[in-house]
Structures are given as structure tokens and as C-alpha cells.
Amino acid sequence: MISILIPTYNYNVFPLAENLQKQCEIAAVAYEIIVLDDASTDKKSFEKNSKINSLKQCSFQILDENIGRSKIRNQLAEKANYNWLLFLDADTFPSSSEFISKYLDAFSNKTSVIFGGIDYPKNNSENFSLRYKYGSERESLPLAERLKNPYRSFITMGFAIRKEVFQKIKFNEKLAGYGYEDSVFGYELQKNNIPIHHIDNPVIHLNLETNEVFIKKSQLALQNLLNFYESGVINGEMVRILKTYLKLKNWNLLFAIRGFFCVFKKPVLKNLNSPKPSLFLFDLYRLGYLSSLKPKDA
């Protein structure tokens, strides 16, 4: 038995719900698909998503006010009737027609959390080059790589979890802003000694941001990351860039990174907006931005 939970905002999620509903029917499993709209402003998405209510065992509801990424996921879990919860972001899509059956095969008394991975469609557009390269090289990790760091490689874009386990962890509703909610949730699983079972069953991330938008969102995410660390909801080992930042801070070298950021910001941004962006330069840019958030630290 499975409850498929999808939060959405200004996005047409009907094709996703329709595909999942067909797969569940073929698998002959007890299921439900619940879609919650976080008070979207796009009326066209309302019209498209309202068709979800016509699908068997599917429901679509619009919230009266925007409540944010964490709270809407917790509300979805509260509405769920079955013992396994499958969370999917609105802009994902199953990588195969066996997507549901592979998750069902992985459900057992020995598993509590299951992550199938993330994949990216080929995108040769210059405007999306940075997001595509970062996603395909840093997030779309093969199973063998994910198994080396099961908590660090966990992404909440698509994962299954037992309902009783989720009720103990939940998404932290006190956390505001954008970015690194995956790391916080993974850290909670690690603290509570809840293993993540990795399988080869990815979702495809469809909705890539432009280079400009991705850079801005990355900056917001870094602000969030530092706030998470300072408030104690994540440790310094969970995120690679935070680990590097803290090492440089201990070595009194943040001033050097900050200086690089100030001097070379424009040429680095030029590269990041090019057809062939460098992830090494993107890491330096993010480190420089992170160091500039707390200039008194060095």
C-alpha cells in the first residue's frame, strides 16, 4: 500500500499524476495520489491540475495560503492513509514504466527510507548550461557512488519513507527560505540511526532553472545553509561546501577566498553563464559568496 504525495506551485502536475496512476493500476497495489497546491498564482495551472480529481484514487486541493516547502509536505503526510509514503516534487517524472513496481519491490520490514536517485534529460541550451552540468555531475549519481555517502547523497526530490518513521522526523517547519532542506532531513535520519536504502530507480528532474536564476537561488541556499549550521540543525560534515568553509575559517584563510571573490567575480560569472561553465569556478564562487556573508569571521 502506498500514498504518493506531490506538493506543487504554479506547475502542471497532471502528466505526472496520470503516469503514476497508470503504473499503480498495472501494479495492482492499494494506492492514493494526493496533490496539494501551495496557493499558486497561475490560474492556468489550476485548470490543468483540477483534472487530477477525475483520475481514480487521485485528489487535488488548493491551499488558501502559501505555507512553504516543509509544512506542505508535512500536511501531505497527515492526509496519507497508507503505511508507505512516496514524496515526489512536481517537476519530476518517472524514469521508467517500472518506477512504481521497483519501489514496491524495495518495500520490506528491513527498510524504512528508500531513495532511487535523480536523473537529468540532456539539455544543450546555453541558458541552462550551469544547472544542467551541476545536476548531471553532482546530483545524478550512480548507485555505487551514492552508497559511499548514503546520507550526503540523499535528495528529497523523490523518496519513499514509512509513515511511522516520517512522523518521528518530519520536515522542520521552523526552517524558512530556500535550499538544503534535503541535507537537514538527511541529517535527522542520520542522528536517529535510520538507514537510507539506495536503489537504482531515479526520477527525472525536468524543470531546470536558467543560469541567472540558478546562481541567485544558490546564493539564497548558502544563506540558508549558514543559518542551519549556526542554529544547530545540521553539522559541518553533512555538506561538502560547508565543510570546506569551516576548514578555511579554522585556518584563517577566508580572507583569501573573499579577496578572490571580490576581484574575479565578474569573469567567473561570465564563465558560469557560458555554454561550458566550470563547476570548479562555481565552487570557488559559492565559497567566496559564503565567506562574504560573515566578513567578521576572518
Image (cartoon, helix red, strand yellow):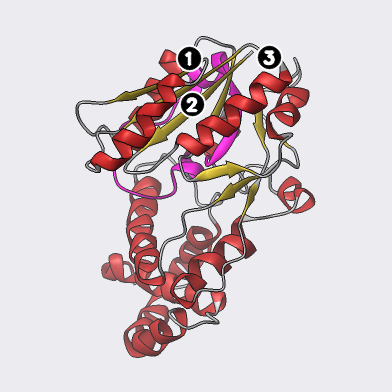
- Residue in the picture at 47% in, 69% down: 128
Disc 1, disc 3: CB below 8 Å? Answer: no
Report the quarter where the N terminus lies. Answer: top right
In the image, 3 versus 96, the foreground residue is 96
Figure check: 293 above or below 189: below
Identify the element where label 1 is drawn: loop
Q: Are marks 3 and 2 in contact (CB under 8 Å)?
A: no
Which residue, given by chain and number where applicable, does mark 3 sit on?
29
Q: Is residue 36 left or right of residue 244?
A: left
**The magenta stretch spans which residues?**
156-184
Contact check, label 1 and label 2, Cβ < 8 Å? yes
Q: Is residue 1 left or right of residue 175?
A: right
Please say if 74 is above or below 285: above
Residue annotated with mark 2: 5
Question: Does residue 216 appear in the picture of this structure?
Answer: yes
Q: Which mark is residue 80?
A: 1
Give the residue drawn at x 37%, y 56%.
Answer: 221
